[in-house]
Image: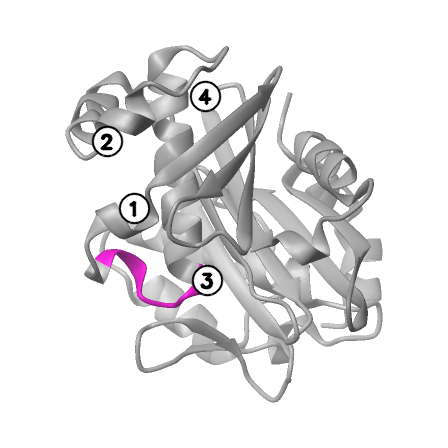
Amino acid sequence: MQYTMFARQYRQFLSNTVKRRSLQLKGPEGSYLLKLSVVSLPPEDAPLEYLSPAEQEQYFGFQYSRRRNSYLLGKLAAKMAVAEEEDDLSSIQIEHGILCQPIITGSTRRITITHCDTMGAAADYDPRLMAGVDMERVDEKAADAIRRITSKEEETLVTELAPPQFLTLLWTAKEAMSKVIQTGFTVPTELFEIKECVCRGQAAVSEFRNFPQFKALSVVRREYVFSIVLPGKALSGSAEAMLLQVLQELLPD
């Protein structure tokens, strides 16, 4: 189904479930289009016309609801990030590369996807960029595990956030960076050590010890932390503050 038709027919569904934003980042080679989506888990009776027949068959073939939910969040977030007004949503196909990195079939653009619990997000970006996203739920039990892989230097970083939020923020920034280089955490986590973190209320900008070319922009909303990593060259001028504002607007209040 074409996006414009889907939007007309299921206006309430999109209003309750999907937030989308597009923005132009500027760098040495010109402008880079970045398209973001954040989605909430749809109810069980929600429309599925954005899925192809094969995707619907795969969705209904999952035995456990947790797996169905993660599949749906990933597909919905990706398609909503990619879709232009005239695109057929069911024809937007997301496949996976040799290291399980997501790939938009038939497109030169790139995509990065994350989902956690009842939330999902994706970024469709210019191939001249490099990007990664991650979203995690703040959980004190998980924070204890994250603390065990946090360096002594990271523990000394000054932050206004509560410890569970800050530790979760570190994790999301690191995982987003691991998606940029398309390895995930198959390499030592020490590689993604955070060198600096500057908090601005419920938002933060972090820099990496071993990847000085990149910055992580993170926002905390309710019980979730959402981070995106991009090259610092694409975040010059007011772009950094603008993107943080966009991320805050995308996440639920």
Magenta segment? 180-185
Q: Is residue 118 left or right of residue 154?
A: right
Q: Are marks 3 and 1 in contact (CB under 8 Å)?
A: no
The residues tagged by marks 4 and 1 sit, at their Cα atoms, a distance apart of 19 Å
Q: Are marks 2 and 1 in contact (CB under 8 Å)?
A: no
Helix, strand or loop status at disc 4: loop
Question: Which one is in front in this view, the residue at disc 3 or the one at disc 2?
Answer: 2
The residues tagged by marks 3 and 1 sit, at their Cα atoms, a distance apart of 26 Å
Image x and y of residue 125, in percent: 66, 66
Q: Residues within 10 Å of mark 3 (few under 14, many from 20)?
A: many
Among numbered discs 4 and 2, the one appearing first in the sequence: 2
For label 4, the residue is: 223
Residue 125 visible in rendering: yes
Q: Quadrant of the C terminus?
A: top right
Helix, strand or loop status at disc 1: helix
Amino acid type of disc 2? Thr
Question: Which one is in front in this view, the residue at disc 2 or the one at disc 1?
Answer: 2
Question: Which one is in front in this view, the residue at disc 4 or the one at disc 1?
Answer: 4
Image x and y of residue 9, in percent: 79, 55
Q: Residues within 10 Å of mark 2 (few under 14, many from 20)?
A: some
Among numbered discs 2 and 1, the one appearing first in the sequence: 1
Amino acid type of disc 3? Val
Among numbered discs 4 and 1, the one appearing first in the sequence: 1
For label 2, the residue is: 150
The residues tagged by marks 2 and 1 sit, at their Cα atoms, a distance apart of 29 Å
Q: Residues within 10 Å of mark 1 (few under 14, many from 20)?
A: few
Amino acid type of disc 1? Arg
Q: Is residue 42 left or right of residue 64?
A: right
Among numbered discs 3 and 4, the one appearing first in the sequence: 3
Q: Residue at x 54, y 52 (%)?
A: 214
